[in-house]
Image: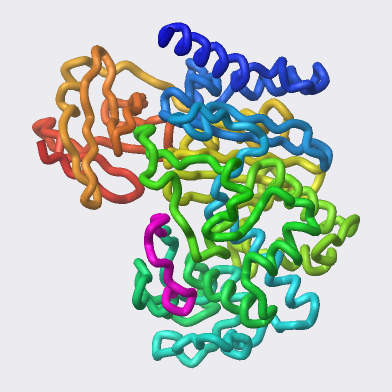
Amino acid sequence: MRKHHFLFMLMYFFHVNFSGAQSGYPIEVENRIKQVENRLMSWVQTQDTLKWSLKQRMDFYKIQGLSVAVINEYKIEWAKGYGWADTSVHKAVTPQTLFQSASISKSLNGVGVLKLAQDKKLDLNTDINQYLTSWKFPYDSLSKNKKITVLNLLSHTAGLNMTGFPGYSQVDNLPTIPQILDGKKNSNTPAVRSQFEPGLRSQYSGGGVTISQLIVIDVSRQPYENYMWQSVLKPIGMTNSSFAQPPSDDKKHLLATAYRTDGKKLDGNYHIYPEQAAAGLWSNPSDLCKYIIETQLSFLGKSEKVLSAEMTRLRLTPYLEGPVALGVFIENRGGTKYFQHTGNNEGFTCTYYGSLSEGKGVVVMLNSDNGAILDEIVNSVSSVYQWKDFYNPVIKKVISVPEQTLSLFAGKYMLNGESIIISKDGEELIFNFRNMPWKMYFTSKVDFFVSEFRADLKFLMDADEKVNGFSVFGQTANKVE
């Protein structure tokens, strides 16, 4: 009986979650779905093309579930779920499954804050303390007598600390936003304070975005989730999404469970994020595609469900030199500009891209800490849908390294307090970081790469061919064993 149950579930999983034939899309769309599912690609290509199926990479990365939606010509062309929202109860991912949007929340928060500016309820260039009534930012000498503006908060140019937040378990006593900003009482993070003067340069700060959350609350005189629902999510049509933290009871049957890089469930299923503007949105790719499409149409002056064309164009304009705009990052790929953001909460990762012209876009969401697959899926979508010059892999020629030399590289390395194990597997070397085993490819006797993250690595050897470590991103991982 148990054997038959296992076989049934295996067949169900393969049929429902990896078969495009049951989705009901036109045949040409079905064909594109199958192509996307079977040509995931790395940042690098070799003489032997690095290409995999979606199922192969989900198995490799130990990803339990993921969801994808693709925009073509300003419409959602398809949306599909793969794998499990929760393995323990065999709950499959569907297009309606909700994932934590993590830092993608910042993009929607930017819309909400600019809506207040559009309605003349705040000025983007005014000192934030003019709008904060329940708490005041404590300026000190590090800000050099310069005041932080709302634009600084949204563009990460306020000179503040706190990149991100770890969230809270479902049994924790949640802190208030002022307690989080002061690092007091139930807060599990330090106070949000100046590190350098505002307007000097960009430094990513979830802490600054959390201050903008409090501005929304104080100015609108509503709970943050209520304001965002009425002013942003509902008008756009993101009817399954919510900033409520913890999530409301009527959404719980749709929630995905969070999993670690080893495929094990996060204690309590997911964390709670009172830092709603920075990390608190629950959504799915279809709803986020509605946000992307509305942004695209508003940018062209063809829709203003929330923001005018003028305000949308401001939101999509980098504040200083570089890619950072107001809640989004701007990338130029082959002459086409895209607005995008990624996200990473405990047990969830996600990404989106939307073009500023031609109505192209994609959203990918996972219930896993391992986000390496995100770019591989986006590369596949951009290739299948012929996004001009979006996917431009680095071309490398792989060589064979003598087995005797490979043995010299095997061992334990330490980088920033974390261990990396390099082990020999037949005629190959395996790079194991955070329990993820990655195949190593050599381009010279000492130069190598792995396909799972974009970096050029080089072994450091002395004149006697003793291996002392390897270099990566300008740092050295020292060999200790």
Q: Is residue 165 above or below residue 180?
A: above
> In which quadrant of the rendered image does the N terminus lie?
top left
Whole-percent x, y for residue 127 in the image: 60, 88
- Residue 334 as seen in the image, left or right of residue 297: left
- Residue at 26 percent across and 13 percent down: it is 427
Q: Is residue 192 above or below residue 343?
A: below
Depth order, front residue of 264/431: 264
Decide whether residue 303 is among the magenta residues.
no
Depth order, front residue of 372/228: 228
Residue situated furthest bottom in the rendering: 145
Depth order, front residue of 434/264: 264
Determine if residue 394 is in view. no
Residue situated furthest front in the rendering: 1
Residue situated furthest right in the rendering: 302
Q: Main structural element of the magenta stretch: helix, strand or loop?
A: loop
Q: Quadrant of residue 2?
A: top left
- Residue at 16 percent across and 17 percent down: it is 404
- Residue at 83 percent across and 38 percent down: it is 73
- Residue 468 as seen in the image, left or right of residue 273: left
Whole-percent x, y for residue 66 in the image: 55, 34
Whole-percent x, y for residue 237 in the image: 78, 52
Determine if residue 358 is in view. yes
> In which quadrant of the rendered image does the C terminus lie?
top left
* Residue stretch rendered in magenta on the structure: 168-180
Decide whether residue 175 is among the magenta residues.
yes
- Residue at 64 percent across and 75 percent down: it is 216
